[in-house]
Image (cartoon, rainbow, N blue to C red):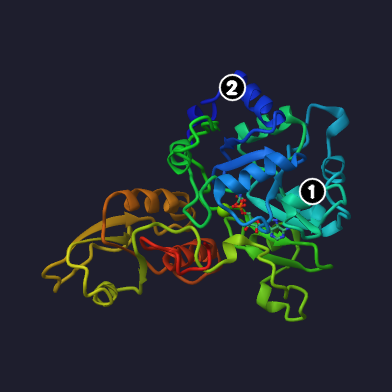
Amino acid sequence: MSSDSRSLQSSAVIDEAVQTLRNGGLVAIPTETVYGLAADAKNPEAIKKIFTAKGRPSNHPLIVHLAAPDKFDQAQVDWLPILTPWVRDLSEQALKLIEAFWPGPLTLVFKKDKSVLSELTGGQDTVAIRAPSHPIAQELLRKFKGGVVAPSANRFGKVSPTSATDVRNEFEGMLDLMVLDGGDCEVGIESTIIDLSSGDKAVLLRPGAITPSEIFAKTGVKVYQPGELDDGQLGNDLPKVSGSLKAHYAPTTPLRLYQPGRVLDALSEFPDIKSRVAVAVWDSESSLVLEDRPSTDVEEVIVSSDPTTFASRLYRSLRDLDQQGWDLILFPEPPTGEEWDGVRDRLQRACFGSGPSSSSHDSN
Ligand code: TXA
Ligand code: MG
């Protein structure tokens, strides 16, 4: 993100956004991960508007976004007074994660304070919280002086927006929706989510830019994969993480992954596709050599082999390719390794949900 984009919105516009939130309205806001559709976390009517606008089932919980402590305000130098109105108890472990990674792309799930509206937690007794680092989001939150719920500003199951224009395209019909423009999102995929609510173990619910090894290196806190704790603690039927549904983050053009060097195999799975195929190719590899593709018009799109850069452009590429009228989009299978987990997760779900009608999938 350029420094220019950080100042795309004047203070007056942010004041207007604060007023809109206070009046129970929705405002699309930039964060460092993706754009969010924000509402006052204490206003049940405003929260309902989010579910309606997104077409999201009401039992899918939202993340509460909070302002970071103001270093210049002596009355508010630490996280404790900021969090206590929202969470029942704050462990040592939680404080370590917060000190190390907030504000930033890390969401933590806690047992909720009883005052937290069940409309935002999907009826669960836990609440997800994060402090975004984007300066416009922080300015808005500081001025608003309260919690703001903000799911990604896309229709349910679709690709998350990483620019103000994406948000406008996503909610074309909502002409009066206020969209704060904070430029292109730096991280590009949604925050890492860690569940701290089920006792003393931290569990990864959604992989993101901040990985378990980075967390361990900076804090000494071990983060478990959900499968590692097979004690039934996590086993219930509630969709704790809507992004955990198989189909999500999906373009309307069919999207598939190919194994290294296996583009032709992937193409042969689609014998009907005779025309236009976009094939993403690692920038570290030489151009594809496609010997036998008589009737297929294949065009290469270069993608970064650095996971951070790849993530920052993933949704941008999917949206752009989706607009270009391809019959099929092929992406290379990301390498193994934790630093690729967030990207692999999003790509796999995008593949599963892709295609003109995703009505057969479980995200609808
Ligand atoms: O990066 C992000 O987290 C973005 C930006 C806008 O902040 N927000 C975002 O929100 O991704 P959303 O609603 O698209 O995804 C939030 C995820 C959902 O999958 C939801 O199920 C999960 O967080 N979540 C919310 N509350 C939860 C809870 N109490 N327990 C478990 N998961 C929860
Ligand atoms: Mg989302």
**Residue depicted at x 22% and y 75%:** 271
User: Would residue 33 be seen by someone viewing this image from the given angle?
Assistant: no
**Three-letter amino acid code of the residue under disc 2:** Val
The residue that appears at 68% across and 51% down in the rendered structure is 62
Tell me if residue 162 comes above or below residue 211 in the rendering: above
Residue 43 location (% of width, % of height): 75, 39
Q: Mark 2: few, some, or many residues within 10 Å (few <14, many ≥20)?
A: some
In the rendered image, which residue does mark 2 sit on? 13
The relative height of residue 330 versus residue 67 in the rendered view (above or below) is below
Q: Which mark is residue 164?
A: none
Classify 79 as above or below 72. Answer: below
Amino acid type, callout 1: Leu
Instruction: Say which residue label 1 marks.
Output: 117
Secondary element under disc 1, as helix, strand or loop, is loop
Hey, which residue is sitting farthest top in the picture? 12
Question: In the image, what residue occupies the spot 78% across and 36% down?
Answer: 69
Q: Are the residues tagged 1 and 2 within 8 Å (C-beta)? A: no
List x then y, in percent, for residue 267: 25, 72
Q: Residue at x 81, y 67 (%)?
A: 198
